[in-house]
Structure formats: C-alpha cells, structure tokens
Amino acid sequence: TDTDTPQNHERVYQVELIVFSRPEINPQEAWPTDVKLSYPDNLVSLKTDNSSDGFSLLPASERTLNAQAATLARSGIYSVLYHQAWRQNIYARKTHIFISGGKSVGGHQELEGSIALSVGQYLKIQTNLWLSQFAPAGTNLTESWPSLPPLPFAEAATSDKSQEYLIKRIVKVSQERSMRSNEVHYIDHPLLGIVVKIIPYDTAGKIN
C-alpha cells in the first residue's frame, strides 16, 4: 500500500457507470491509427462471481442513474453502450475492471477496455476504453488499424467469433479524473460520454 496516500477513505463504495456514444459532429476528422490497446494485469470481470474479493454486481433496480440512462436512450441521439452498478472495496492502489458493451461483431463489442478506481484524498477514475467501428469483410478501407486485443474473459464474447469483419476505426479514451463521492461526474469526449457516480456504502446495508 502507498504509505504516502491517506488511507482513511479506503472502504466499500457503490459505483455506477454509464458509457454512451454520441453522434459525430465532424465525420472527416482524422483519428490516430497508432493507438495502443491492452488490458492491465489483475483485471476483474463483473460478470463472474467476485463476491469473495468484495465485488458485487447489483440488479438494475438498485441503480441510482436509471432516469439519466433512460433519458439518453430515449433521445434518439445517444446510444447507451454500458450501464452497470456494483459494490467494491476501493483502495489507494488501483483496481482494474473490465468494461464492454454495445453491438457485438466477430466476438468483440463496440465498447471494450477497462477502468481503474482508487482513492487517496479524492476518489480517482482512470479510463482505458476504446470504441470500435466495424465494416463487413471485403470493404475497401483506406486506413490500417491495429487488431483488437483478445478478450480477457471468455464469457464476454457474446457473438459468433467466426463472423468476418474489418475495423473501420478505433478511438481510445484515456483520461484520469479526480472525483468527490456522492456527486455525478461527466467525462466528455467527441464520440463518447461517460457518467459515473461513486457512493460510500455502509456494510450494514445503507448508502451513506
């Protein structure tokens, strides 16, 4: 543990995350093709039972941002790619959580990557997410993109892996943000929006 960081904020929190795509304002904008895509070590999947490690995925009824997600979904402009809530211990050292969502193509999804959570004086979230656009095999593409890294958890591949596809574009969102608990925070990007709320959780069963 990092002894230079105050430890008194380490505890159980309820985390809620929404990731949505937004319409492209400038379709001609060039995005770097030399993006580096990788998953960190010690990655946790919320789709598996991690209760022994202090992770607990929550049912939709216990989410606090359902109204915001519904507004995004009804907008006809935005597309909600990911919305989950869970409880976990957040420590001074980072914990890395696997994130994926959106349409499935060839064993991958539009949104993949991870987030890292930690706490010192403030809560911190670090995003390591990428948004992929796919094209049918045989499409004539002018740009060459890196291959998507293999999914770290087999159960995350929800579509037919034999489906042939090409990558039309990959946009990576790598940002770090300090946060206060109980506040809704937004991370902006031209193609993605991220909404996150982290609430201290009393192990007696109460949100503080």
Image (cartoon, rainbow, N blue to C red):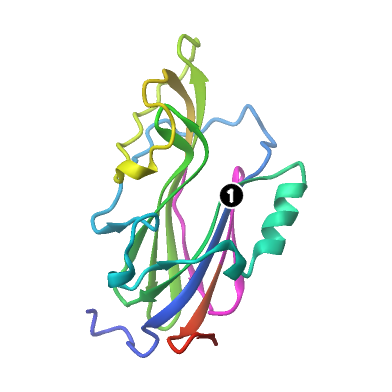
Residue type highlighted by circle 1: His
Quick one: 112 or 143, which is closer to the camera?
112
Q: What secondary structure is the stretch in magenta mostly built from?
A: strand
Q: Is residue 83 above or below residue 52?
A: above
- Quadrant the N terminus occupies: bottom left
- At 32% across and 65% down in the image, what residue appears? 50
Q: Is residue 171 above or below residue 17?
A: above
Q: Position of residue 164 (x, y in %)?
A: 41, 18
Q: Residue furthest right?
A: 75
Residue that carries the numbered disc 1 in the rendered image: 189
191 part of magenta stretch? yes
- Quadrant the C terminus occupies: bottom right
Q: Is residue 65 above or below residue 110?
A: below
Is 26 placed left or right of 189 in the picture?
Answer: right
200 part of magenta stretch? no
Mark 1: secondary structure: loop
Quick one: 63 or 43, which is closer to the camera?
63
**Mark 1 surroundings within 10 Å by alpha-carbon count, few (fewer than 14), some (14 through 19), many (20 or more):** few
Q: Position of residue 186 (x, y in %)?
A: 61, 62
Q: Position of residue 105 (x, y in %)?
A: 47, 28
Quick one: 166 or 88, which is closer to the camera?
88
Quadrant for residue 43, please give it: bottom left
Is 92 placed left or right of 9 in the picture?
Answer: left
- At 44% across and 20% down in the image, what residue appears? 166
- At 37% across and 26% down in the image, what residue appears? 161
Span highlighted in magenta in the image: 172-196
Q: Position of residue 25 (x, y in %)?
A: 70, 37
